Amino acid sequence: MKTLTLNVQDSFVQDFLTIIDQYKDKVELQKDKNLENDPYFYERQKELHQIRNDIKNAQSELILFEDFAQRTRQLEKELELKYAH
């Protein structure tokens, strides 16, 4: 058996189900639980994999939260000094 993803327009779902009903011995319908919980699951998954690959390939830098907080405080101080007047 092969697994396929099929996108059906909302207005056509009932008609589609009626059409494939005659093939219920050959077709199995399943809801994707990932999409039920998060409609953007696969887009987010792809993005996270890309971020992970970027970090592994040194195209992005992963820093500790403490370092980020320190850099942010330093930037705030610089901006306050620059735009204080």
Image (cartoon, rainbow, N blue to C red):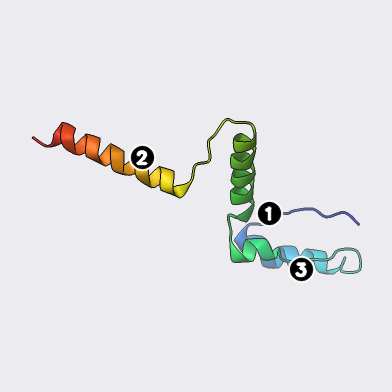
Screen quadrant of the N terminus: bottom right
Residue at 81%, 64% (x, y): give it.
Answer: 20
Distance from disc 2 to disc 1, alpha carbons, whole Å, reads 46 Å
What's the residue type where badge 2 is placed?
Arg
- Closer to the observer: label 1 or label 3? 1
- Element at badge 3? helix
Q: Which residue position is annotated with label 3?
A: 18
Residue at 63%, 57% (x, y): give it.
Answer: 9
| As drawn, 11 above or below 64 | below
Asked if disc 1 and disc 3 are in contact, CB closer than 8 Å, the reply is no
Q: Is residue 68 left or right of residue 77?
A: right
What's the residue type where badge 3 is placed?
Thr
- Element at badge 2? helix
Name the residue nearer the viewer: 53 or 79.
79
Distance from disc 3 to disc 2, alpha carbons, whole Å, reads 60 Å
Q: Which residue position is annotated with label 1?
A: 7
| As drawn, 83 above or below 36 | above
Q: Position of residue 19 (x, y in %)?
A: 79, 64
Q: Earlier in the sequence, mark 2 or mark 1?
A: 1
- Element at badge 1? loop
Residue at 73%, 54% (x, y): give it.
Answer: 6
